[in-house]
């Protein structure tokens, strides 16, 4: 299979798709002002081709901050695209669509991946999707777009998760997650006074969450929102850690980008040597896949901001280009199999 990446910093979709012939699956990443226009135009240009889309920045060897980006797969994939609606209420109502689509593409855990774009309520959406994917152990990579809108096959949806099932007809697929953080000290916290709907942590070990965070890191209220780039929370999940970013200060509480429940055990994380970790990720992928057709990734907005502030973003994309055809989305939350994570990179590699 082959991966195509096209872009237009001016938002000209025809410019972005120039040279794209006979696509078998398309992903649209557009700006908020012209998203719906681009969705309709894409369907007219490639009628009947499975597609999903969201509002967000895209990249290959450089980031497209505005305008429009297109990632498409050609020459050797079998794909379908669909949507689960009402993700904030009852996405399980639509799970039959995914179950039928898995059969339609002949999904197999060795050669098939699910790629999703979500409007929010990610944990619920992923739990729902996983009820179907886990039976065949189909991996998943995806993320959250901006402005609460996604698209599927030429139609815009709100409160939904758009997904594509992509089967590589000429080789394997595998998903990866990169974590550039490690545990800081031996801090362990029991969360309480949480608000699941608003992703709020009220207290840690019985003390106001904001005060606990400030007393350890010696930061002001205003500095908390940038300190999370270096010191997010982490939730231990088996042998893995799910990163939890701080979104804003709510009185003496902390609002996050990921749900935290009463009695969850949290740790504090510290930014590591991200350049060395990037090299380790690349080496791991190269060991697993000596020959690669494509890599599609989702990088967190906070990683993008951190790397940009440290003048590393361009170098990062250049380093990732060693893998071959690498392209992706800057997301507002990252999906890895059945997990919703923050401040991470997730990707799928096609042999």
Image: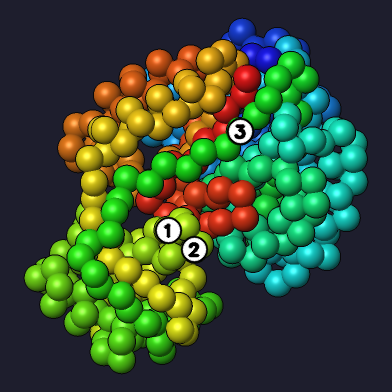
**Residue 349 location, x and y as percent?**
57, 27
Task: Report which residue position mark 1 lands on.
Answer: 241
Disc 3 residue crowd, few under 14, some 14–19, many 20+, Cα 10 Å: many
Q: Is residue 36 above or below residue 236?
A: above
Task: Report which residue position mark 3 lands on.
Answer: 174
**Residue 95 location, x and y as percent?**
82, 57
Question: Relative to 113, is 207 on the left or the right?
Answer: left
Q: Which residue is depicted at the point 53% across and 57% down?
A: 340
Image quadrant for the C terminus?
top right
Secondary structure of residue under mark 3:
strand
Q: Are marks 1 and 3 in contact (CB under 8 Å)?
A: no
Image quadrant for the N terminus?
top right
Mark 2 / mark 3, whichever is N-terminal: 3
Secondary structure of residue under mark 2:
strand
Farthest residue in the left direction? 218
Q: Is residue 286 above or below residue 21?
A: below
Disc 1 residue crowd, few under 14, some 14–19, many 20+, Cα 10 Å: some
Image quadrant assignment for residue 105: top right
Q: Are marks 1 and 2 in contact (CB under 8 Å)?
A: yes
Q: Is residue 250 visible?
A: no
Q: Is residue 106 above or below residue 60?
A: below
The Cα atoms of the two marked residues, 1 and 3, are separated by 20 Å
Mark 1 / mark 3, whichever is N-terminal: 3
- 93 or 320: nearer the eye? 320
Disc 2 residue crowd, few under 14, some 14–19, many 20+, Cα 10 Å: few
Q: Is residue 190 above or below residue 135?
A: below
Question: Relative to 69, is 86 on the left or the right?
Answer: right
The Cα atoms of the two marked residues, 1 and 2, are separated by 6 Å
Q: Which residue is depicted at the point 58% across and 44% down?
A: 142
Task: Report which residue position mark 2 lands on.
Answer: 237
């Amino acid at each position: 299979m082959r991966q195509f990446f096209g872009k237009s910093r001016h938002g000209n979709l025809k410019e972005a798709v120039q040279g794209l012939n006979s696509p078998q699956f398309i992903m649209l990443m557009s700006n908020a002002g012209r998203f719906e226009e681009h969705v309709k135009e894409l369907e007219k240009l490639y009628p009947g081709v499975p597609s999903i889309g969201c509002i967000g920045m895209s990249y290959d060897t450089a980031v497209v901050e505005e305008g429009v980006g297109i990632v498409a797969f050609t020459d050797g994939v079998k794909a379908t695209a669909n949507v689960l609606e009402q993700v904030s209420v009852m996405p399980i109502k639509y799970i039959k669509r995914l179950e039928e689509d898995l059969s339609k593409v002949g999904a197999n855990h060795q050669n098939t991946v699910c790629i999703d774009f979500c409007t929010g309520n990610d944990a619920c959406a992923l739990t729902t999707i996983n009820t179907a994917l886990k039976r065949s152990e189909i991996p998943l990579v995806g993320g959250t777009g901006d402005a609460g809108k996604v698209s599927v096959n030429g139609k815009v949806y709100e409160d939904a998760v758009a997904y594509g099932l992509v089967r590589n007809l000429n080789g394997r697929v595998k998903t990866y997650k990169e974590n550039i953080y490690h545990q800081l000290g031996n801090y362990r916290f029991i969360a309480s006074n949480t608000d699941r709907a608003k992703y709020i942590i009220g207290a840690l070990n019985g003390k106001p969450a904001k005060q606990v965070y400030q007393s350890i890191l010696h930061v002001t209220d205003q500095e908390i929102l940038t300190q999370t780039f270096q010191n997010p929370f982490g939730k231990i999940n088996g042998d893995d850690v799910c990163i939890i970013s701080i979104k804003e200060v709510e009185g003496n509480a902390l609002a996050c980008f990921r749900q935290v429940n009463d009695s969850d055990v949290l740790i504090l994380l510290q930014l590591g040597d991200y350049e060395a970790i990037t090299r380790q990720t690349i080496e791991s992928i190269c060991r697993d896949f000596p020959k690669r057709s494509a890599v599609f990734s989702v990088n967190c907005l906070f990683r993008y901001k951190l790397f940009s502030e440290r003048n590393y973003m361009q170098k990062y994309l250049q380093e990732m280009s060693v893998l071959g055809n690498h392209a992706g989305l800057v997301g507002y939350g990252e999906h890895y199999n059945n997990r919703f994570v923050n401040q991470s990179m997730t990707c799928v590699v096609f042999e």
